[in-house]
Image (tube, rainbow, N blue to C red):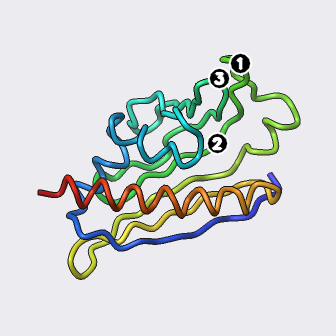
Amino acid sequence: MEKTTIKKEIDINAPKEKVWNILLEDQYVRQWYAAFSEGAFAETDWQLGSKVLFKDTTNNGMIAKVVENTPNELLSVSYEGLLVNGEEDTQSDDAKAVQGGYETYRLLDSVGGTQLAIEGDMTPEYFDMMSEAWDKALLKIKELAEVHAN
């Protein structure tokens, strides 16, 4: 995969456990994934080694595998291909272009709460669009975690 990596972080006034829940619980995931695609969600149990299907309302998206899961600290997935009209594609040139990329979430203690740091690999043509989407997603994660921290 010819890739470029987006790296962003945000300070959240909420404990790591709450931020972790916002990252993984479906009711919250659907809210912050909307920054990338309205109606997007993840079909997975988030356990180490589990398949992840990142889907949108058109049944398109990405296929990944959970490669690290340390609760309340670290989650990382490795991209394995694309989901096209509900069919898994790991063989096309487009699918091969995303293989080997990672998406990683790190939660660190910070003054007043948690620092969430994300890294996401992608092909260069999507960098600007995804960087902007991540800015929106991180603000939504912050909002959800801070509202539900109590």
| Marks 3/1: CA–CA distance | 7 Å
Tell me whether the residue at label 1 lies in contact with that at label 2, contact meaning CB atoms closer than 8 angstroms.
no
Q: Which comes sooner in the sequence, label 2 or label 3?
A: 3
Please give the name of the residue rendered at 45% of the width and 58% of the height, measured from the top-left corner: 105
Whether 7 is drawn above or below 69: the answer is below
Residue 63 % position (x, y)? 62, 33
State how many labels appear.
3
Residue occupied by mark 2? 79
**Circle 3 Cα neighbour tier, 10 Å, few/some/many (<14 / 14–19 / ≥20):** few
| Marks 2/3: CA–CA distance | 19 Å
Instruction: Identify which amino acid the numbered label 2 is placed on.
Output: Tyr
Q: Give the SS element for disc 1.
A: loop
User: Mark 3 or 1, which is nearer the eye?
Assistant: 3
Residue occupied by mark 1? 85
Farthest right residue in view: 93
Please give the name of the residue rendered at 56% of the width and 53% of the height, measured from the top-left corner: 103
Horizontally, residue 29 falls left or right of residue 119, namely: left
Quadrant containing the C terminus is bottom left
| Marks 1/2: CA–CA distance | 18 Å
Residue occupied by mark 3? 58
Tell me whether the residue at label 3 lies in contact with that at label 1, contact meaning CB atoms closer than 8 angstroms.
yes
Residue 65 % position (x, y)? 55, 37
Please give the name of the residue rendered at 29% of the width and 56% of the height, measured from the top-left corner: 19
**Circle 2 Cα neighbour tier, 10 Å, few/some/many (<14 / 14–19 / ≥20):** many
What is the quadrant of residue 28 in the picture?
top left
Horizontally, residue 76 falls left or right of residue 26, namely: right
Farthest left residue in view: 150
Q: Give the SS element for disc 3.
A: loop
Q: Which comes sooner in the sequence, label 1 or label 2?
A: 2
Whether 115 is drawn above or below 39: the answer is below
Residue 119 % position (x, y)? 56, 63
